[in-house]
Amino acid sequence: AARVGPAVVSVDVIRTEQVQTRSFFDPFPMRRTRRSRGLGSGFIVSADGTILTNDHVVRDSERIMVTLPDGRDFEADLVGRDQLTDVAVLRISGTDLPVAPVGTSDGLLIGEWALAIGNPFGNLFSNSEPSVTAGVISGTGRHIIPDDEDRVVYLGMIQTDASINPGNSGGPLVNSVGEVIGVNSSIFSRSGGSEGLGFAIPIDRALRVANDLLTSGEVKRAWLGFEVDAGEEDVWGRTHGVAVSSVSPSSPAARAGISRGDRLVTANGKALRTLLDFESLILDLEEGESIMLGIDGRQGAVTLVSE
């Protein structure tokens, strides 16, 4: 907490939204403009003032104000955002900015300690220091299917029982040696508060997305050249593998000998049980990276290089 806490910031946004109003005397709804405030968290990852947060924290924002734990306020610029991964990058100009040590989300152990740091109550408290909650890594590689109001499918997420509440979004998930391993993003909750089911974006993914946004303003997506459908369900509703539904000519998949109707059962040695397993793999795949696919009925894995 002492290593990472000074670099955790509060993110306040002002946005304008369109709302519908209906009066008793007028049956036709009217649209009017309303200004609203939003609140989240973030953390500084480089001395030049680069900040990681969630896309949903700053989406549709007109102004963004960042507050450091020492009380300093900065008007922030939105460098870029990616709705698909729910990652956004901000930048502030300042001196003597604290920087959060960054680790890796690779090789996390179920049951290892984890801290969630953020600003769940915003300006409700009289000071601007972030709150710290403790728990463990409850699971890795979790896929979360969104509800009707959400526009993000969270794939390959880190699950933790460290308390995460609204306002914590965009703050860091930290390991026991004070390294950031994830970006807190969402919770499962009936009440709207923490119930011990919090989810964080793996930091390796967040940094890759941030680097693309910083260098080119957009996220580069790898292409394999084929589409898949979910495999057939058994009587219990479970699937095994994904079915190739189409292959683009002259694509990496076509050159590797993948055909329509093939059933993919593993990717880089990991089982593909559902369509979301495959989508999560593609989400983290980089251009030029090799991938080994196990195909049902074939000896050995098929290797192809993404474009």
Image (spheres, grey):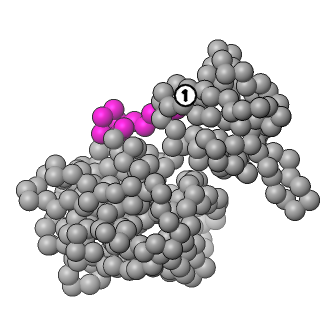
Q: Is residue 177 left or right of residue 226?
A: left
Q: Residue furthest top?
A: 250
Q: Residue 100: name its quadrant.
A: bottom left
Q: Is 103 above or below relative to 1?
A: above
Q: Amino acid at mark 1?
A: Ser
Task: Please state which of residues 155 and 54 is positioned toward the viewer in this rendering.
Answer: 155
**Can see residue 235?**
yes
Q: Which residues are magenta?
A: 212-222
Residue 150 located within the stretch drawn in magenta: no
- Judged from the image, the secondary structure of the residue bearing numbered disc 1 is loop
Position in image of residue 221 (x %, y %): 50, 34
Position in image of residue 48 (x %, y %): 16, 49
Identify the residue under disc 1: 306
Position in image of residue 200 (x %, y %): 47, 63
Tell me what residue is drawn at x 50 percent, y 66 percent.
109
Q: Is 255 above or below relative to 129?
A: above
Q: Residue furthest front?
A: 299
Tell me what residue is drawn at x 7 percent, y 56 percent.
95
**Can see residue 186?**
no
**Are there few (<14), some (14-19), or many (20+) residues within 10 Å of tag 1?**
many
Q: Is 150 above or below relative to 134?
A: above
Q: Residue 51: name its quadrant.
A: bottom left
Q: Is residue 255 left or right of residue 95?
A: right
Q: Residue 246: name its quadrant.
A: top right
Q: Residue furthest right?
A: 235
Q: Is residue 27 left or right of residue 129?
A: right
Which quadrant is the N terminus positioned in? bottom left
Tell me what residue is drawn at x 47 percent, y 62 percent.
108
Position in image of residue 225 (x %, y %): 64, 26
Tell me what residue is drawn at x 61 percent, y 79 percent.
190
Residue 219 located within the stretch drawn in magenta: yes
